[in-house]
Amino acid sequence: MDKIELLQDLIDKSHRIVFFGGAGVSTESNIPDFRSSDGVYSHQLGRHFTAEQLVSRTMFERYPEDFFDFYKKYLIYPEAKPNAAHTYLATLEKTGKLKAVVTQNIDSLHEMAGSQKIFKLHGSADRNYCLGCQRFYDLTAFLALEGPVPHCLDCGKVVKPDVTLYEESLDMDVFSQAAQAIRQADLLIIGGTSLVVYPAASLVNYFSGTNMVLINKTSIPQDSQATLVIEGKIGEVFSKLRQ
Ligand code: NAD
């Protein structure tokens, strides 16, 4: 059996599948990840800040112009469309086999593809709130706010994307529900993530089922824990499976 047949076989005989993914799931939709050789971290970011510093709470508070410049340039892709990975997962959920998608991504491509049960560990670029009056702005309304730092149309305070920045803690409700879904899974498929961002990466430790599959363009240390490792593009891999 080749690796695709093995994956198909594991999916066929599993009943509670959970998918856990990261930025690599959206690269085939032309949203760059962080750590690939052509990822965001590979760009010359200007000034003297690293990308990690640029998406930190300190940067947001002390240098909001640099923060929003980086955020809008490298993390927001309003034109992006779901790729074969997103659509396959949405279809698998409809068959009843896939119980949840756990994602570190802040884009909304899983929702656009039709997935229903999604745990977004790092929030969503689609949600933005005024830090003064809490007025809500969707992505379109947020991008329409003028100036280098977006200010609320009602009260004039800064509007912050509802995404988890470095130095901020995760929404523990979302984290616990994701952990619960992974704990109950019989097959965990992990794809498109370097698994280096914590505490998200620690979710893997909640898995107690039999089969763990890793699908990544490059190898990662957790490969040794997996039943099956497929090196390749996740959209291409999923499009070879029975739909
Ligand atoms: P990462 O950049 O650290 O790692 C991405 C991994 O995916 C790498 O191992 C890479 O080899 C692999 N990869 C890239 N394209 C792939 C493909 N087509 N198929 C299979 N594998 C592929 O990403 P991460 O682990 O998610 O951590 C980065 C953090 O940055 C996350 O917290 C995430 O919130 C954020 N981020 C999100 C987006 C987004 O929302 N789309 C984009 C960039 C970064």
Image (spheres, rainbow, N blue to C red):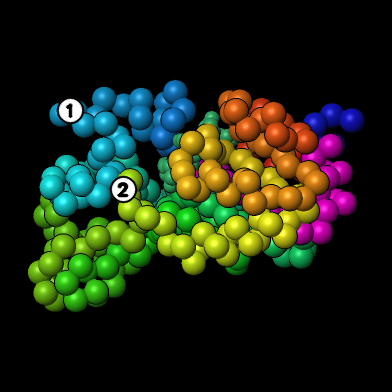
Left or right: 164 as drawn, with respect to 220: left
- Viewer-nearest residue: 2 or 220: 220
- Rendered residue at 30%/35% (across/down): 51
| Tag 2 secondary structure | loop
Magenta part of the chain:
6-26
Assess disc 2: are there few (<14), some (14-19) or many (≥20) residues with their C-alpha within 10 Å of its C-alpha: few
Q: Residue at x 33, y 53 (%)?
A: 168
Can residue 216 be seen? yes
Single out the mark in the foreground, 1 or 2. 2
Label 1: element kind? loop
* Residue topped by disc 1: 48
Distance of label 1 from label 2 (alpha carbons): 19 Å
Against 3, is 93 above or below?
below
Q: Is mark 1 within 8 Å of ligand 1?
A: no
Decide which of 43, 67 is in the foreground and name it: 67
Residue carrying label 2: 167
Is residue 30 placed above or below 163 in the rendered structure? above
- x%, y% of residue 205? 63, 46
Q: Is residue 35 left or right of residue 22?
A: left
Q: Tell me which numbered mark, 1 or 2, is placed earlier along the sequence.
A: 1
Q: Is residue 223 left or right of residue 243?
A: left
| In the displayed structure image, the side of residue 192 where residue 134 appears, left or right | left
Q: Pinpoint residue 37: horizontal percent, then vertical percent.
A: 44, 23
Identify the mark at residue 164; answer none if there is no mark.
none
Q: Residue at x 46, y 28 (%)?
A: 36
Q: Is residue 15 magenta?
A: yes
